[in-house]
Image: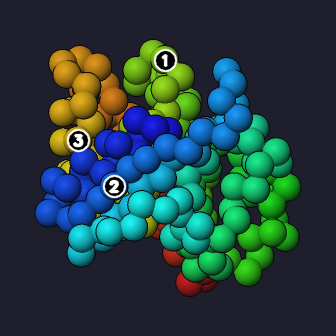
Amino acid sequence: MVTAAEILSVAAFGEGRHAQAFPSFGSERTGAPVVSFCRIDDFEIRTREPVMEPDAVIVQDVTLIHQVDLFSGLSKDGYVLVNTSRDFDELGFGDFFSEFRPERLVTCPATELALELLGRPLPNAALLGGFAALTGQITMTAIDKAVRDRFAGPVGERNAAAAAAAFSFVTSKEEELARASSD
């Protein structure tokens, strides 16, 4: 997620916005959970403090959901993107997210998309494509360019394809939700 946050910040810069990305390592041991932050704003960002009240949370590793308080500080208007093919009820979060805005909650099989398109279980680019679709805070064009700039040649092409596939996946889930709520 450190790389994903960096790519997201580069994409924001590419759109003329201000951004900063930084990781937070807890107990520095192999396999310890890593949290990475990205701030994006239309104005200069002066703070260097950890993000205590995020507007969005991306969960790359679904096994952390019940081990770490990933949603601490997230408001009921926040965005949640979780890397899994399961839904929130299957993850045991049906009640937890009951007061959140359902159109801002989505699961996306980013690892599966990465395996299919990259041949490796590296979901970062796919999650960024899903984030772009879910939040509208960054364009898919900016994500595509930042991914291709970070990873040259065929690796960049495959990562960009994974980002585009996740963008399409999340967009189609949002359309399904909109149709269901209008019925």
x then y, percent, for residue 39: 39, 62
Relative height, residue 162 to residue 172 (above, below): above
Residue pictured at 40% horizontal, 20% vertical? 118
Badge 3 element = helix
Task: Please state if 123 lies on the left or on the right of 156 as rendered.
Answer: right
Disc 3 designates what residue?
Answer: 146
Relative height, residue 32 to residue 141 (above, below): above
Contact? badges 1 and 3 (CB < 8 Å): no
Which tag is nearer the camera, tag 2 or tag 1?
A: 2
Q: Quadrant of residue 95?
A: bottom right
Badge 1 element = loop
User: Mark 3 vs mark 2: which is more N-terminal?
Assistant: 2
User: Mark 1 vs mark 3: which is more N-terminal?
Assistant: 1
Q: Amino acid at mark 3?
A: Ala
Disc 1 designates what residue?
Answer: 120
Residue 183 in view: yes
x then y, percent, for residue 59: 61, 47
